[in-house]
Amino acid sequence: MLLSIVVIAAGVVLRQVDRAHFVLGRPWAADARQLISLQRTRANDVTPLLLLLGQWVQIAGWWMLAAHGLLAACVAAAGVAVQFRHLQEVSHAAVHGVLARAKRANLLLAEVFAHHPLGLVPVPVRVRSHVRDHHPNAAEPGLDPNLIELAAAGLRPGVSRRAFAGAVLYPLTLRGLRCTVARLFELRLASGAWHRVAVLLALPVLAYLCGGWAAVICGVLLPRLVLYPQLAWLSTFVEHTWFDPDRRTGTLAEIEAGRCLRLYPANRLLAVLAAATWLPYGDLLHYAHSSHPSVRWNYLRPLERHLTPPHFLPTGLLSGDSVTRRHYTALAHAKDATPELADARSHRE
């Protein structure tokens, strides 16, 4: 068990090389122009590689830990799910072209270290759906692919309280699990690429070599099919005021201030916990990212301090003036469900 903990710690240390490189000389607060200028002077293709290697070293450590009993295997399942979520967000930076210096390096790092092993869509497909379709159309019915996906899961006008709860936990439901598995295998079969199939087979083999069948079940299957999808789903859930945005005009930052939110603005402990687990690599600062997508996650905090706060600052995820309460109220009080239902049907078709 000690060796597994050492390996996890080594992965954490390896990841800090990239962080230390980019935070050097970072101001406390600055506008996007200043931050992008600094970002360009620090951009490189080496520290992002070390960052991604560190993520996988940590995963190997969790796989090793899974072999040490049931409790350790359960902890390892959560640990791997968090690392998968981190890989998704690192690849998100690559999709925006801010992970590494070279365009090809962004593509290769995202494909090799995240999209291939996690069974995600090819990076060019992700660029189209996220950068071209989502960002300009965030929270716009019929245009935003994320909003269409939320509606397809049941988050539609007129939803009941029970159906709303099921939709929030959609990846954990039987229907959500079937969808996750179907998408994974449809992607593998449709791609027809031998390297994607090879990675699909290699991941459980590597897990088995590190921690036996416990690592395969609790370090690959459970995190990839159940836990990681739920973390990713919740991250989407808290990015925008999806169902009742305050539509504004003006600069991009002013527009995004009307359709974004900022989770845990006054709770430092929960903010740190979220940033370390399910909202990593700047996803907690989604308003700052949406306002200036070309800014790397290391510089979103100084940028956020420079921006006017978004229109909704929830007290938390569940309690008080929460994200969940706002989304449910907006949907439950909506009168016409037809447009969203049509969007959901077209998305499924």
Image (tube, rainbow, N blue to C red):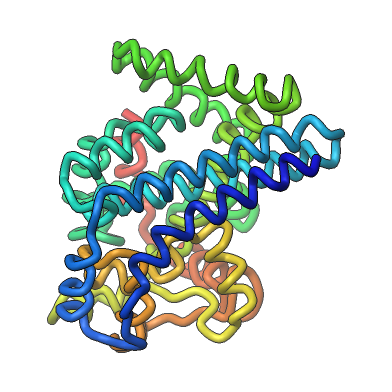
The one nearer the camera, 143 or 102, is 102
The one nearer the camera, 336 or 199, is 199
Q: Quadrant of residue 139?
A: bottom left
Residue 82 vs residue 3: left or right?
left
The residue shown at (61%, 41%) is 80
Position of the N terminus by quadrant: top right
Q: Quadrant of residue 315?
A: bottom right
Residue 84 vs residue 194: left or right?
right
Does the image show residue 141? yes
Rendered view: 265 above or below 189: below
Rendered view: 198 above or below 150: above
Number of marks: 0
Rendered view: 337 above or below 116: below
The one nearer the camera, 105 or 90, is 105
The residue shown at (21%, 74%) is 38
Rendered view: 58 above or below 305: above
The residue shown at (31%, 49%) is 46
Position of the C terminus by quadrant: top left
The one nearer the camera, 222 or 93, is 93
Residue 214: % across, % down: 75, 26
Residue 147: % across, % down: 35, 52
Does the image show residue 150? no
The residue shown at (38%, 78%) is 301
Residue 126: % across, % down: 27, 40
Residue 86: % across, % down: 48, 50
Q: Quadrant of residue 317?
A: bottom right
